[in-house]
Amino acid sequence: MIRSMTGFGAASVEQDGARCTVEVRSVNNRFFKATLRLPGDLESLEADVEALLMRRLSRGSVTLLVRWNDLASRATARINVAALEAYAAQVRSAGIDGLGHELRISDLLGLPGVVVDDRAEGIAEVARPIVLAQVDRACDALLEMRRREGEALRALLAGFGDTIEARLAEVRARVPEVVGAYQDRLRQRLAAALKELGQSANDADVIREVAIFAERTDIAEEVARLGGHLEQFRSLIDPANPQPAGRTLDFLAQEMLREANTIASKSGDVEISRRVVEIKTAIDRIKEQAQNAE
């Protein structure tokens, strides 16, 4: 299946006295890379969230944002009275009488250890199933967007495959003509050269030279391999294929380009060279578009 790596998904819910919103977006990357942005109270959930993303998404740079608003009583931190009294005692011993204008209560509350936030562990346990469920829903929305964009991408790739198939068929048809044309040219050159000597061309010599040329310029194996790669290409972009195809397409495009280059180097025919240029252009476009396929 062809899916784009570009997409966005979001999900939100209000449950158990909390409101959770998850947004996930992805862009191109050769591998899977996740960037997670969770509130401080939920940082302990990062490993679980990333594991879920890796199960759902096989490729791409993924950015996930979690917003968590706790509306329940557990959202209130507590004041460490002992620490506050200790600070107050130090203030009094320093000669500052009461809080007065010199010191405000907010100043004391801002001192280390006065306000204790020991809610994080409890909040994380409450939040875990809620957050993971919303991450899963956001991934569903992201994958649906990827699927829709992948359909357009698949149609584009199929068009490049059609171009390669058509040009390859023309190359196959041209090969016998190339050998025949070489044989005619060889006979003409030999006849012109031997005419001055009063001799005629030996058919055996002509046949031998034509056989050498045909062997040297034989591209049947390369054409067959490129045809095989094209069949594999068709199966990869087939909607019935459940596996992500991006990396395989990238590798396959390299192999197709290798065969096309060999055909171009072995065949000195202008018409075949023109067809190969079109084939290589289509392969380059496949390679380019494969970078956006999951």
Image (cartoon, rainbow, N blue to C red):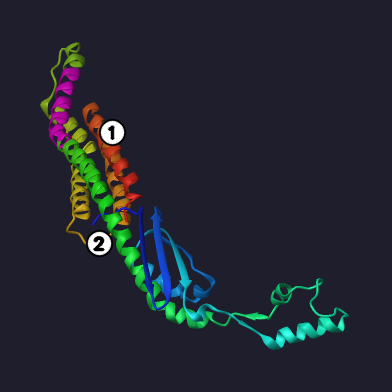
Residue toward you, 98 or 16: 98
User: Callout 2: helix, strand or loop?
Assistant: loop
Q: Secondary structure at mark 1?
A: helix
Q: Position of residue 287 (x, y in %)?
A: 32, 46
CA separation in Å, label 2 and label 1: 31 Å
Question: Number of labelled discs?
Answer: 2
Q: Is residue 210 above or below residue 242?
A: above
Q: Residue 51 appears at what percent x and percent y?
A: 40, 72
Quarter of the image with the N terminus is: bottom left
* Residue 101 vs residue 36, the one in the foreground: 101
Front residue of this view, candidates 187 and 50: 50
**Residue assigned mark 1:** 277
Residue at the bottom extreme, as displayed? 82
Q: Which residue is mark 2?
A: 243
The amino acid sitting under disc 1 is: Val
Residue 221 pos. (x, y %): 20, 45
Q: Quadrant of residue 135?
A: bottom left
Q: Is residue 207 above or below residue 91?
A: above
Q: Residue at x 23, y 29 (%)?
A: 269
Can you tell which of label 2 and label 1 is closer to the viewer? 2
Residue drawn where x is 75% and y is 73% of the image: 104
Q: Where residue 190 sits: x, y (%)?
A: 18, 19
Residues shaded magenta: 170-190
**Magenta residues: mostly which secondary structure?**
helix
